[in-house]
Every structure is written in C-alpha cells, then in structure tokens.
Image: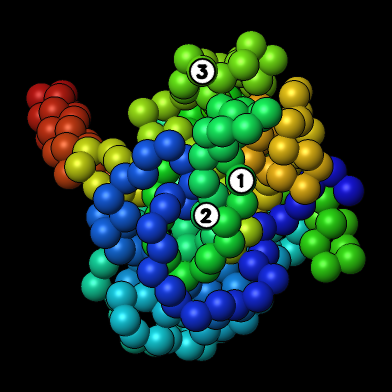
Amino acid sequence: MKYRILFATTLCAFSAGAHAIYGHSQLNAATFDTVGIMLGGGSGTVISPHFVLSAKHVGGNGFFINGNLYNAVQRYDHPTADITLLRFDTPFSSYSLPTFDDMMGQVLTFVGYGATASERTSGTNAWTGYDYLGGFGTRRAVTNRIEHMEDAVYDIGGTSHSTVSLEADLDYYNPNTPADSQVDYYGGGGATANEGGLIFGDSGGGALIQQSGEWRIAGVNIWIDDTHGPNPGGNSNYLDYGDTFGATSVRAYQNWISEIAPEAVPVPEPATFAALSLGAMALLRHRSKK
Ligand SMILES: [Ca+2]
Ligand SMILES: [Ca+2]
C-alpha cells in the first residue's frame, strides 16, 4: 500500500502540547477556530452553519469544538473518495466556506489536532527532518505549497478508493541540513514561511487559504507518504525532508458538496449582481429604442 492514512490509533486526553502540528515554526492556531476534533480520532472543519467537512476514513458522528460537543444528525460518506460531510441541527456561528478555485502553486495553511514532532537537531542525522512525539487534541497550524495533484487509489478499511489529492512536500530550511537531504521532491519551490506537515490525527482537518479576508477550505487532510529521496529517519518516520502528504481536493468534489450542502456554496460577489443588473438595464433601453 502506497499511502498511510492519518487516522489516530488512540484517542488520548485533550492535553496541551508545546510543539507544532509539526514544523519549524507554527502559526497562531487560535485563528483557526472553525477546525475541531472528530471523536472518531481525527479532525474536521465547520464549512457552513450546519455542516462539517472531514475525511471518510475518520469515523463517528461526534464533533468537539471550542469547548462544546456536538452530534451529527446525518453523515454523508462520498461513494468513492476520502471525504465526508456531517450535518448538525444546532447551527455553528463561525465557519470556513469552501473555495473551488485551482490550488496548484498556492500556499495553504494545514490545521489539525494530530500528534506533533520535534526537530532532529543533533546526532548523526541532525537537520534531516523531525522525530515523532505523539500527542493528540491540540489545534496546530503550519503552511506548505501545493505542487502536485493526482487521482490516487488507496485502501480505506479494506476497500479500494480513489481520491483526487492536493499534494505537498516537506522542505528543509536550515543551511545545516546535509546536501543529501536538501531535496525539493515535487520541484515547486523550497520551504514556506511556516513549513510543516501532517501526522497521525490530522486526518479530516482543513487545508485553508485566505481569500478577500476570509479563511476558506480548499482541502481535507488525508494521507502521508514516506521514503521519498533520502530517508534518514527510516520507513516508520514520515517526517524526513522530501516526504510528502496530501489533502482531498475540495474543488474536485464541488458538485457533491453543492448537492448535499447547498448552504456551503459561496454566493457570487455583490459586484457581479450589480454588473448583471446594469447590463440588463442597458439591454432594456436598447430594446425600447427600437
Ligand atoms: Ca514544501
Ligand atoms: Ca522516512
């Protein structure tokens, strides 16, 4: 199996952590208060007053956010892709609407409640990546750039599924990194300002982007992959520079989201309506002169 999914194997207490989702620096995660915990062992994002978007391989209907526990009244698993919508009766006051724009080359903010890692700063493999620390239940955020997209087939609960993924690589940033580990796997550019990645428990969390002052969701965290290029941390370490990860493309599933959760589809900007109405007026005037 090529991909390891990011399901948290054990749901630990919601302990406070001192480190990042993982990455050499992290953003102020308090900003991203639309991302919560899926009690099935992952993360999820509120995308409209009544809907949460998560990953299909993260189970359950329970959702914990900003100190409150909610239970979904209905769960909608996509028939083929690793994406799930959950509908709630109680309306959420804060949400991150989807964006259906093309994300290739864009820097996204990846948010989740998964484990974290520490920088490998000493020893034989110093500055070649991160070492797994564990921990679940703290909201963390890092950035990375989308440099690749593919329709990847992989296994979810013993069934083969196909998901269009937005993909990013983990880049080095420190000049002390050995030459062998100075890899840009997808070739789309080096480390972003808060370069980091995903690890177990981040599944279902949001890959967000700020558009016109609003945080929108562009992807759903689903997988990590190992053994790209140098692999100093070994095959059970997904945090070596050059390792990759992916998020379900929200754009690829626009029709499915729109059918189930029409309230989550952003309405056109008011300027569009203004332009149309002016055009309609001009058309009416033209006709009346005939
Ligand atoms: Ca990168
Ligand atoms: Ca590795």
Residue at the location (31% across, 45% down)?
27
Question: What residue is disc 2 on?
Answer: 116
Amino acid bearing label 3:
Asn
Cα–Cα span, label 1 and label 3: 17 Å
90, above or below 214, in the image: below
**Secondary structure of residue under mark 1:** strand
- Residue at the disc numbered 1: 131
Q: Quadrant of the C terminus?
A: top left
- Depth-wise, is mark 2 or mark 3 nearer the camera? 3
The residue lying at 46 percent from left, 21 percent from top is 174
Disc 2 residue type (three-letter): Thr
Position of 83 relative to 175 (above/below): below
Q: From where the camera sits, is residue 89 visible?
A: yes
**Would you place residue 165 above or below residue 4 in this image?**
above
Residue ranking furthest to the top: 179
Instruction: Decide if residue 63 is on the left or right side of residue 279.
Output: right
Q: Nearer the viewer, residue 39 or 131?
A: 131
Q: CA distance from mark 2 to mark 3?
A: 22 Å
